[in-house]
Image (cartoon, rainbow, N blue to C red):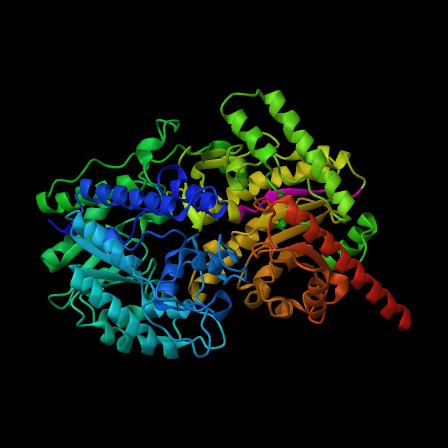
Amino acid sequence: MPLTHTPGAPRIGTDRALPRALDAYRAGEIGADALEEIGRDIRRSTRAAQRAAGLSFVTVGDFSFFDHVLDMSATLGAVPARFGAARAEVSLDTRLRMALGEAPSGAPARPCARAQWFGTAYHCVRPELEEGMALRLSSTRLLEEAAEALAEGHPVKAVLPGPVTWASLARGPAAGPGWLPAVAEVYATLIARLAALGVAWVQLDEPVLATDLAPEWQAAFAPAYARLAGQGARLLLAAGPGRLGENLALARDVPVDGLHLDLLRGGDEAERLAADWPAPKVLSAGIIDGQNVWRCDPAAALARLAPLARALGARLWLAPTCSLMHVPADLAAEQGLDPALAPRLAFARQKLDELTLLARALETGQAPAPAPRPATPDPAVRAALAAVTPAMGRRASPHPQRAALQRARLKLPPLPVTTLGAFPKTGEIRAAHAEHARGEIDEAGFLRRLGAATKEIVARQEELGLDVLVHGAAERDDPEGWFAGQLRGFALTGHGWVQSFGAECVRPPILHGDVSRPRAMTVDWTVYAQSLTRRPVKGLLPGPVTLLNRSFVREDQPRAETCAQLALALRAEVSDLETVGIRILQLDEAGLHEGLPPRAAEREEYLAMAAAAFRLATAVVGDATQIHAHVCLPEAAALPDALSELDADVLSLATPDGPACVSALRDWPNDIAAGAWNVGAPGVPEAGNIATRLRAVAEQVPAERLWLTPDRGLAERDWDTVEPALRNMVAAARALRAELGELSAAS
């Protein structure tokens, strides 16, 4: 029977035990020893589940208190000077300060940047390299975790981010492939120490192989891996998720003992390699989807695996396509799912069982039972989609004409100040949601409490001097899930948590059928907020692509078709909001980058789908109604044409790099809302610093086209930070308006 393993497992514990503990530790409610014990319990449980499922190896190294890439930076001693010298063991608090800027101990400092982990919705902490940084083995956590597993009698496979992927993620003036010799030296030391403990295999994750690798990075692979060979443990190079393309030959020739490939997204790459795969190398087939929740089709899986098994024999291993950290832990925890839907699903625990079933079927020739059929189509949704015309995706007039009407209608000052939607989820708001979920307050009482919270949020914004207000989204306990719960075609889980960044977890909705909107979703709350103020209140909706990318999406039809269904549902809501007099509508496409293909050649089709869906959702409004698009896109500066295709009147950018992020949009006529406050950084930004940043941005984009916003929603911050930060944003805007007025008078 083929050997089975998983590239990684969920690490947040039952019902977010680890994130809850981490938050308690940061708040001073528990100590480091209690946090460590919770981590040990999660690791023990994870190992036991893998062995109970019959896997050939137990994976270690996939656990992290915060982020596995950050852990690798700590292991290498790659700690920027502002966090203090890298000691023999980089502490958890140092890691937390690198990720978040602050921790229970140590001085606050600017955190390292985030990066999307290849082809997934997970975000990691970017390594940061500085001139003169001396790399050395600076953490033994992986060795301790391997010793834990070995002491329990498990056959162990350790996993690490690959050296080339880690180095390629690094930023800083000194970053580049020139660091790889020093990086490989530390890796070699670590692998040798793992081997000395008794670890037989070390998996090195190199998802960078599924991207467009520059020649210098391609050339760096062979020498880096040559240094890792011969350290006593066999090496499994894990490529993907995704197709390797021109990097397939590179992956084939790296001096390792085995290669893991994504069979589901890699086309025929595994078959091409298997034809002359040299003995004794192993080929690990990623046949179970590690990024989605649907049961595998056993007949289709066995049809792919059978020829590989004939060619490779015992050298064929079976595995998920990638780490199972991207799916919920256990379907058995879900009690409220539709009985017709549940049999179609497999969470992480069930995917381990699927591996064993496939391995046994390969050995016996007896296929497991087929997967249940998909949902029945909705004729009304299909008819509405068939009736879509190109004209439905076009505004009546070009932006310059629309902008003149909007300025006359809104009468906003130069450099308008607004926010991106959510305001702090206070203890009172969270308590109202929790009590309502437990049935302790009825619907009327719940709505009264949320109404009071909304009234306070609007009043605070007026007092702070914001120019365009929001209702604050107090009713939305989970942004995408709240909308999914009101749309047909979605299912919500009770315990389907997935880690997105550190202690931040989400419960992605399951998009399993045709999508429609049975009733208005946001109209009542938005109208209520507008009734409390004379200033304009924005209507707030997710964009269709964000809803798509932040859900587990059905696989029985093209994603573009599903995305168009989402756009039609949102179009109806946009129309209703305009009808009741809402003059500004913001669609949040903060998840646009999460579906962005890693290869440039594949991006055009995706971005065309995204733009078409956004326009279909928004082009129903008249010229005088202003459409905002919020994108949190690190590649925004490189994609001006794609962003212009959204045809939004105002584009809200995170602008993490300030002027550099908007410079490519200097000739774009639409307005830009620059993220003037990095909400993820500790502390309160000073008005002078905000003004300086905006002056630099205004050198790239004319000030008359600029708005000011925070760079993301404020739900996870507290009012003690939000209030002074917004007050400083307003002060910066007023100072710059005065400067603009003086310049205008002088001219």
In depth, the one of 337 and 458 nearer the eye is: 458
Q: Position of residue 653 (x, y in %)?
A: 61, 58
Q: Position of residue 670 (x, y in %)?
A: 70, 60
Q: Quadrant of residue 521?
A: top right
Q: Quadrant of residue 746?
A: bottom right
Q: Which residues are magenta?
A: 535-545
Q: Quadrant of residue 413?
A: bottom right
Residue 552 visible, this orientation: no
Judged left or right of residue 491, residue 274 is: left
Asked if residue 542 is among those painted magenta in the image, a careful observer would answer yes
Judged left or right of residue 714, residue 81 is: left
**Residue reaching furthest to the right:** 745
In depth, the one of 627 and 238 nearer the eye is: 238
In depth, the one of 174 and 40 nearer the eye is: 40
- How many marks are shown on the rendered structure? 0
Q: Position of residue 589 (x, y in %)?
A: 56, 51
Residue occupying image coordinates x 66% and y 44%? 620
Image quadrant containing the C terminus: bottom right
**Image vertical order of residue 403 relative to residue 430, above or below:** below
In depth, the one of 79 and 212 nearer the eye is: 79
Asked if residue 677 is among those painted magenta in the image, a careful observer would answer no
